[in-house]
Amino acid sequence: MGKRKQNDDQKQSINKKFKFNNTSTTIDPNTSGIYATCARHKEKQAIDELILILSERINDFNEIEEEIKSNENQSELSIEDKIKAELSELEETTKNKNSNLLQPSKLDCECVIFIKTKKPIDPVKLVTDLSKECYESGIKNTRYIQKLTPISDSCSATSENPTIQLKLLSEKILKPHFHNDQDQKPIKFAIQVSRKNFNILESDEIKKIVAELIGKDYGHSVDLKNYDKLIIVECYKTNIGMSVVEDYQKYSKFNLQQIYDKSINK
């Protein structure tokens, strides 16, 4: 009973910190975050659960402290004013650090939720770490969350020529993985496109654009079964999100429920 009360208190505290805008059901461009699926009519519980889980893990990012330090006010102030400013900023940062880095977004879509993340949080690392933890421990720490999908960045598809925005996004996301001029090795890849309330571009058209931008200069090739990296393209309404992930098949497509079920069978 004590543990359950503690978890309830944590969720109530989180609910006070994390509130989403009920008037908007779209995702802005240049947004990173994590999609998650859940059981029908359990979206609210899933949001609370995922926020709690992510909040416990984002402190592991050493870059957070570096980000805080780099953002300190360096303007010309007196010593006394600078100390006051730093103390005030530290207090505000400690109070709102997690709530600023994680924000739930309301979606007009059943069984799907989205948690917006801010730098220095890496959605791909968070999702991969959660999946790996479940895979290696055989313990499922979630009740409502099922499948996770990380989004490193996104763009708008509402312009007159949405393919241009998609190309710009693809170049940004793909470059670190496929276009390293110093030591780039051939990579077998696949492209996965998911569309929810989205009809601006067809799936085949999106795959063609992304594949052409990867190119063949470095010996990269498509392999739908035994790929090294998977390019995830998640389309929702007027937003196109993208990420590049590894170990997608090993970790049951980042489906925590399936990972857990397989560990039970083993």
Image (cartoon, helix red, strand yellow):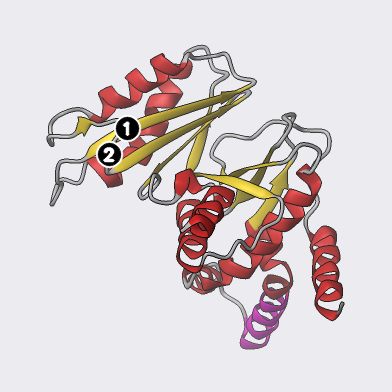
Can the viewer see residue 193 in this picture?
yes
Q: Position of residue 81 (x, y in %)?
A: 68, 82
Q: Mark 1 points at which residue?
A: 190
Amino acid type, residue under disc 1 in the picture: Ala
Q: In which quarter of the view is residue 108 placed?
A: top right
Q: Distance between the residues labelled 2 and 1?
A: 6 Å
In terms of depth relative to the viewer, which is nearer, 240 or 252?
252
Q: Where is residue 234 in the image (x, y as percent from the top left)?
A: 52, 32
Can the viewer see residue 73 in this picture?
no
Q: Mark 2 points at which residue?
A: 227
Quadrant placement of the N terminus: bottom right
Vertical comparison of 146 with 193: above or below: below
- Please state if 5 lies on the left or on the right of 96 as rendered: right
Badge 2: how crowded within 10 Å, few (<14), some, or many (20+)? some
Q: Residue furthest bottom?
A: 80
Q: Which residue lies furthest to the front in this view?
A: 265
The range drawn in magenta is 78-91
- Do the CB atoms of the residues marked 2 and 1 lie less than 8 Å apart? yes
